[in-house]
Structure formats: C-alpha cells, structure tokens
Amino acid sequence: MKKRKQMSEAFLTGALLAIVGGFLDAYTYICRGAVFANAQTGNIVLMGIKLSEGNFSDAGQYIIPIIAFIAGILISETIKGIFRKNSFLHWRQIILAFEIIILVLSAFLPSNRANNLITNTLVSFVCSLQVQSFRKINGNSIATTMCTGNLRSATELLFSFFTSKNKESLNRSLQYFGIILFFITGAAIGAAATSILDIKAVLFAAFGLLVVFFILFKTGEKANEEI
C-alpha cells in the first residue's frame, strides 16, 4: 500500500525550513561572533585555524556549538521515541515548539562574548533538532540547514537526466536546487534583518518555525507515522 505523504515532507515545509536555516547562519555569523550555527564543518575549520594560531580561548567558542549540535541529534531521537504515539501533537511539532522557545529566549540575550557563546550554542542546538527531524522532501533525503549534500545530489540527478532523459531525475534535481535557493534567500533575508534589528532579528526565524508548526496540523501528518 502506498504511504500517504506527510506534510513534514512537503516542498512548502522544506522551503520554509531552508529559509530559517539560511537566516540563522547569517544571523549568528553577523552579530553573534562570526560562528556558523548550521555548518559545523565551518566551525571545525575555524576552530582548527584558531588552534594553529595558539588562540585557545577563541577556539573554545567553536567547539561548544559543535557539542550542542551533537546533543540536539540525541535529544531529537529521544523526543521522537517518547512522543511518536502522541495523538494531539506530532513529535515534530513538539520539537518545533522547543526550537521556537529557544530562539525567542536568545533574542533577549545582549550581544557580548559570553552571551554570544550561549546564543550560538542554543542556535546550533536548534539547527541540529531541525536537521534530524526533517530529513525528507517528497521522498528525497534533503537537508534544510546546510547545502553541500544537497548540491551534490542535485548535480548527480541533473547528470542522470542528461544521460538517461529521465524526467523524474530532473524533477528531483530541481527540488534540491530549489531548497538551496531558499536557503540562500534565507541567508540574504537574515543579513538584511540583522543589519536593521541586530539580535532581535532572530524572532523572524522563530516566526518561520511557528508557521511550519501550524502547517503540520494539515491533513496528511499522523502522530504515529514514521519519517
């Protein structure tokens, strides 16, 4: 029997989450100490650079978000296991509510070294919850908080279309490229909003997640369904 598509896998949901993902990366980099909230590879590289310079204090600001990202993955799986059979809220909605609360709280932490470290840790935690909880769009494994894997898959599928003329490959490729475009859009919006609102700009990301929270109430998302 064909499985009914869930709203968590809809392209609209993925597009909104990608906007939030790009937004948060721009936000933390611009006004929270030049740290990438989503791209832990970038943080690992920056940490290595600081270590090579003997700047162990600055290196520490990168390792903590990395640890928070790992913790978010573990907690996401824990919430999924506990609330998978919840009949009122889908487990993904519980995670979204958790993310929204964290982002709203981070908007009221003044910008200084200590608070920026806390904020980057919280945002990295939020992003790991998102990347672990929303992993598919229309059956495709797509990340909404980073682009490297999406770019690889999009290009591979485009090559497959050119060699096989399979329109399904083209459709899937365009979905990957579309999510990348929305991520870039989110980064641009995040940069513009942060330049105007500074630390309070993160409230826009919280609002985006709130929209996704209500989208998941639409028919097609069952509380006891898997990914």
Image: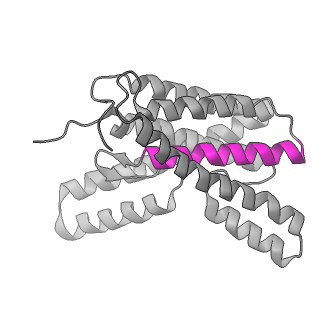
In the rendered view, tell whether residue 131 sits above or below residue 93: below
Task: Determine the residue positioned at 70% across, 54% down.
Answer: 65
Please state if 88 lies on the left or on the right of 148 as rendered: left
Residue 100: % across, % down: 60, 30
Task: Determine the residue positioned at 54% across, 44% down.
Answer: 129
Picture quadrant of residue 108: top right
In the rendered view, tell whether residue 181 sits above or below residue 17: below
Instruction: Decide which of 209, 69 is in the foreground and name it.
Output: 69
Residue 158: % across, % down: 31, 63
Q: Is residue 109 visible?
A: yes
According to the image, what is the colour scheme of the structure? one colour
Magenta stretch holds residue 29: no
Residue 219: % across, % down: 28, 23
Please state if 51 lies on the left or on the right of 95 as rendered: right
In which quadrant will I find the N terminus? top left
Task: Determine the residue positioned at 51% across, 57% down.
Answer: 147
Residue 134: % across, % down: 43, 44
Picture quadrant of residue 106: top right
The magenta stretch spans which residues?
Answer: 112-134
Q: Main structural element of the magenta stretch: helix, strand or loop?
A: helix
Instruction: Decide which of 93, 191 is in the foreground and name it.
Output: 93
Q: Which residue lies furthest to the bottom in this view?
A: 52
Task: Determine the residue positioned at 44% across, 38% down.
Answer: 82
Q: Is residue 187 visible?
A: no
In which quadrant will I find the C terminus? top left
Please state if 80 lies on the left or on the right of 121 as rendered: left
